[in-house]
Amino acid sequence: MAAVDLSDERLRQGVGPRAVVGLLVDRVRAGELGMVPVVAGLVVIWAVLQALNPIFLSSTNLVNLTMECVPVGIVALGIVCVLLIGQIDLSVGSISGLAAAITAILFVNEQWPVWAAVLAAVAAGCAIGVLYAQIYNRVGIPSFVITLAGLLSFLGLQLKALGTSGSVNLPYDSALVRFAQLSFVPAWLSYLLVLGAAAGLFLVGYLYARKRRTADLPARSLRFLVIRSAVLVIGLGFAVWYLNRSRGVGWMFVLLVALALALHYALTSTKWGKSLYAVGGNVEAARRAGINVRLVYVSAFAFCTTLAAIGGVLGAARLAAANQSSGGGDVNLNAIAAAVIGGTSLFGGRGTAFAAVLGILVIQSISSGLTLLSLDSSYRFFVTGVVLLLAVGVDSLARRSRASHGR
Amino acid sequence: MAILRLQGISKNFGAVAALTDVDLEVDAGQVVAIVGDNGAGKSTLVKVLSGVHSPDGGRIAFEGREVTIPGPAAAHRLGIATVFQDLALCENLNVIENLFLGQELSPFRLDDVAMEVRSWELLRQLSAKLPAVRLPVAALSGGQRQTVAIARSLLGDPKIIILDEPTAALGVAQTAEVLNLIDRLRENGHGVVMISHNMSDVRAVADQVVVLRLGRNSGVFDARTTSSEEIVAAITGAGDNAVTQRAARSETVDRSGMAGGAW
Ligand SMILES: Nc1ncnc2c1ncn2[C@@H]1O[C@H](COP(=O)(O)OP(=O)(O)OP(=O)(O)O)[C@@H](O)[C@H]1O
Ligand SMILES: [Mg+2]
């Protein structure tokens, strides 16, 4: 890259939509793909599955799909955080299973109020994360090993807690089960939320652009902001309308989106978020910059295991039961795969909150589509594995291209 | 009065005594150059001052008070800013994020705009040649990274600025800019500690030259009145060594050449 003058970027930004498109093409060529491959992959997967079975894109199935995404999607949000700092948590499945068991036992067997049972399960999840981080900070065992030990131990604890019957049913009329199975956003409110989201996006963008302009920095044009919000209204509005032809948008799905937005804000606009990226990029540099690295580890692990517990509770609520296979099987692998498919790097320092949501949409689409074709889980595992490999392959190629383009 | 005074600082890495009984004094408005051979302990001394390593012995006084520097954050709080030899930047973060790392404005709602404005100010002050500030540091050249690291040390108005080989990778113009900056820092009453292998840079800006040799003080010189030869002698250990031998050899060649002419 030639040594260009300071004003270079300003010059390139100031020249209308043609330049914007040009810049975009430049970036794709240089391997800054961002979300493009996942979204493209999702479109392809949906097209194929729809061709194989026309029920796939029906409103009813898509409503189911959105609901199925939530428990593992929430777990994947946590995984993004530990991957960002260059660590891994292999035990999220066991933790979510344990949280499901704790909730069910306290709520059904011990007759605790439902909120207290959920709170206890989530607190247990949080405590596990703090424990992991303490072991990592004080003893220095790699997180891979610590959480592998956690995977086994907490699975054991879950089986022990559930006892010989191995299963506890949650009553269908409890608030928890109703939330996970039956509560949907009323149609009028869902459209209102869409409008609110678009207005909010516009307002935030407008205020930010104004602030940049007063500071004499290049800013996005009003036209761009209006078009962006219009596209959002049309896109989201259509999706909501389509879902509303069946049962509509589940509150649980709204919860996933809200958590993803909150995490996105925390990662991009707070000191904590920047310190996660810094620790993932160069621990020693982060330490010398005065960041409390140990605290960053504690917060990231605790955040991950807390979300794993919440995901587990919601999973049990959807099933209306906690049993020995809660959190077992593919929860672990799907959560990690979702984060990675969405473009989170396993080596730390790169990834976004939306990655997890897009990734889990891909995985659940495959799962739902293959179930509709009445293929058993062997196919599902196989196809998900191939998609994971493809996603990471595209990302690696993009990275290589980025290196050769000097980015 | 000295802002910073080190007395009898020692630091061991296992069997290696990297620093033994080192003294150092820096006044406000003074530029102290630390010179010494590779492995003399210069960077180790810097890391002790910036809280990266804790010393095994000795005392540190800052503005007359005895202090301990248990970590990098403590050094920042005291007002000691450091540019490390290996720069310590996060390659995945962009220039602005690196400049403000650990010192972000309004931690719960980062003030992007103010940080970007301040970044341009700092970089312009150093005549930085950067294509953009929103580029990840991985995309910058060695010299550009060094400029970013120097700019970072100027944030938050520190009292002492430590530069570990700040001009090693810089171009001619940027080197001059950094030397100008050091002059300006002195005029503004900052204390500056500069490490360099470049004698002409040292003589251009330093008031005092502290020589380290094998982890020990090997002399303190007034930069205005001492010749480069004396400093080199202190660095290498006076007497028999490669540098003096080389100088002696070229002298004999000179003399024999002249003698030949006279005959
Ligand atoms: N982290 C460490 N662990 C073990 N030994 C170390 C460590 N850091 C430095 N040393 C040793 O301490 C001695 C001094 O090293 P230091 O980096 O301070 O040298 P320096 O004067 O900065 O050299 P240079 O001019 O090459 O930068 C060397 O012998 C080195 O091997
Ligand atoms: Mg050094």
Image (spheres, rainbow, N blue to C red):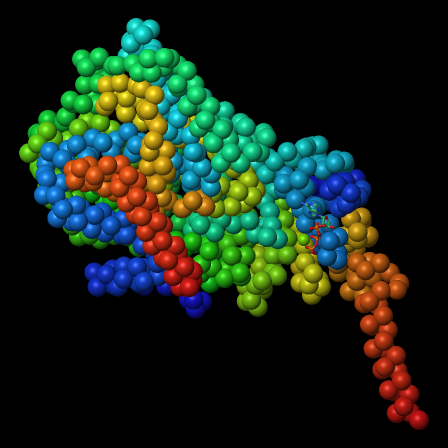
Extreme-left residue of the structure: A245
Query: Vertical placement of B222 versus B229: above or below?
Result: above
Going 47% across and 38% down the picture, which residue do you hit? Answer: A87
**A110 or A323, nearer to the observer:** A323
**Where is residue B49 shown, x and y percent of the image?**
66, 42
Going 34% across and 41% down the picture, which residue do you hit? Answer: A337
**Where is residue A222 shown, x and y percent of the image?**
19, 50
Q: Is residue A232 left or right of residue A188?
A: right
Extreme-right residue of the structure: B263
Residue A219 visible in the picture: yes
Write down the quadrant of residue A248 in the picture. Answer: top left
Q: Is residue B74 left or right of residue B115?
A: right
Quarter of the image with the C terminus of chain B is: bottom right
**A19 or A130, nearer to the observer:** A130
Write down the quadrant of residue B108 in the picture. Answer: top left
**Where is residue A106 shown, x and y percent of the image?**
34, 10
Residue A103 visible in the picture: no
**Where is residue B261 shown, x and y percent of the image?**
88, 92
Number of numbered discs on residues: 0
**B129 or A358, nearer to the observer:** A358
Extreme-top residue of the structure: A111
Going 56% across and 31% down the picture, which residue do you hit? Answer: A137
Q: Is residue B220 left or right of residue A72?
A: right
Quarter of the image with the N terminus of chain B is: top right
